[in-house]
Amino acid sequence: AQSVSQHNHHVILSEAASLELGCNYSYGGTVNLFWYVQYPGQHLQLLLKYFSGDPLVKGIKGFEAEFIKSKFSFNLRKPSVQWSDTAEYFCAVSHMDSNYQLIWGAGTKLIIKP
Amino acid sequence: NAGVTQTPKFRVLKTGQSMTLLCAQDMNHEYMYWYRQDPGMGLRLIHYSVGEGTTAKGEVPDGYNVSRLKKQNFLLGLESAAPSQTSVYFCATARGEGGWWADTQYFGPGTRLTVL
């Protein structure tokens, strides 16, 4: 079955540290890739997405992600995190054969210590 | 604009009771989705709709029914609730223009349901 793996369920960092959250998927064809974020008390919202072109995608709030097709990965990065980045981050994948369904990772809870 | 709203926010049911969750959107989006989220798991699609009057099954449809009589509303029903349906339920919408697979989804705040 197709799946999305997020390697870390919980991450704790200090402010100004660099962040990388892993995401790997198991589908071999053309994919679209998403990172969504849920800040405390807020709705899930799109952080960034990739569907074609430059594999380095920039999103809101200084986040970026790199699509590496050979590694089936779409890792999320931020060079210097802030306390306000505390949230839960979800990676998701879609492709033309997935019948309108996004396939979601289990999420990573990120806590930034002030 | 309210965006995507869900009613109720919290609910506790006894096994065998029924209830309906309402998702309403004012974004004029064609596509609407119902997901459930359980601890340690990603969101799983229950049912979805690609337009008024249409519905289709997702990954985990058993025990749920849906209706989309109006474009702006998507209802999720539990006819006979079971403890396994204890979860957080999210509604989402998407424009539905062009390729659905690249669409951004817009989420409601969630409904936390406990079945005793």
Image: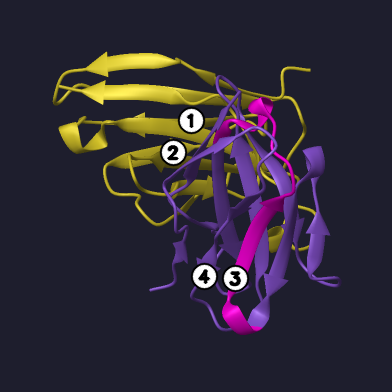
Chain colours: A purple, B yellow
Q: Amino acid at mark 3?
A: Ser
Categorize mark 4 by other alpha carbons within 10 Å: few (<14), some (14-19), many (20+): many
Subunit under mark 3: A
Q: Amino acid at mark 2?
A: Val
**Secondary element at tag 1:** strand
Residue in view at x 44 percent, y 59 percent: A7
Question: Are labels 3 and 1 on one chain?
Answer: no
Question: What residue does disc 4 label?
Answer: A25
Task: Evaluate whether residue A1 shows in this view.
Answer: yes
Spatial CA span between label 3 and label 4: 7 Å
Relative vertical location of residue A34 with respect to residue B8 in this rendering, above or below: below
Q: Are marks 4 and 2 in contact (CB under 8 Å)?
A: no
Relative vertical location of residue A55 with respect to residue A82 in this rendering, above or below: below
Is residue A84 magenta-colored?
A: yes
Q: Are marks 1 and 2 in contact (CB under 8 Å)?
A: yes
Question: Are labels 1 and 2 on one chain?
Answer: yes
Relative vertical location of residue A85 with respect to residue A101 in this rendering, above or below: above
**Secondary element at tag 2:** strand
From the viewer's side, name the closer residue of B41 and B23: B41
Spatial CA span between label 3 and label 1: 36 Å
Task: Evaluate whether residue B82 shows in this view.
Answer: no
Query: Could you say which disc has been placed on residue B75 in the image?
Result: 1
Quadrant of the snapshot with the N terminus of chain B: top right
- Write the start and end of the magenta stretch as one range: A70-87
The spot of residue A75 in percent (x, y) is: 63, 61
Closer mark to the observer between disc 3 and disc 1: 3
Residue in view at x 49 percent, y 34 percent: B90
Question: What residue does disc 2 label?
Answer: B66
